[in-house]
Image (cartoon, helix red, strand yellow):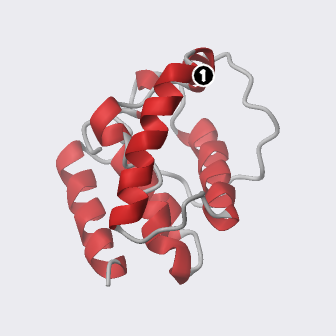
Amino acid sequence: LSRICRFGGAIRDDIEIYSVAQHCVLVSQNVPPEFALEALLHDAAEAYIGDMVAPLKWALPERRVVEQRIERVIRAKYKLPTEESAAVKAADMIAAATERRDVCAINTRCDWGVLPEPWPETIVPVLPAEARALFIRRFLEVYP
């Protein structure tokens, strides 16, 4: 996840990478503690199938089927709820709003829908090795 760039790489030119791993850590840090592991792993399937920009995900329902199969395995392994919790969905949407403000390319033209207010803190993207370390450290904090 630390080597997979969010938004299909459509990030600002002055940013080397903004990884799915860093995104997951941020989401995990912004939910109540009982949802932290679920939030950290909410995009874990992307480690196997990569990240895909939302418009393409919607256009390829068969990809979503594969993603759901992988998610079920991950959720079962870590004893997570079968469906994404409302707290995780909400934090993921706030993360998207914050990412749109802080890391996305200015010329990214897509329908973001209605996003909530972003977090006040600015996202500072880190390189893959640091994102990996952050992810592992967070996993060790939240996995019983």
- Say which quadrant the C terminus sits in: bottom left
- Say which quadrant the N terminus sits in: top left
Please name the residue that numbered disc 1 is placed on: 106
Name the side, left or right, on which 17 lies relative to 111: left
5 versus 140 height, above or below: above
101 versus 140 height, above or below: above
Tell me if I can see residue 125 in this picture: no
Tell me if I can see residue 9 in this picture: yes
Rendered residue at 22%/44% (across/down): 128
130 versus 37 height, above or below: above
28 versus 8 height, above or below: below
Residue 140, x across and y down, in percent: 26, 76
Residue 2, x across and y down, in percent: 27, 45
Rendered residue at 51%/21% (across/down): 62
Q: Nearer the viewer, residue 31 or 117?
A: 31
Q: Nearer the viewer, residue 127 or 30?
A: 30
Disc 1 residue type? Ile
Rendered residue at 52%/30% (across/down): 64
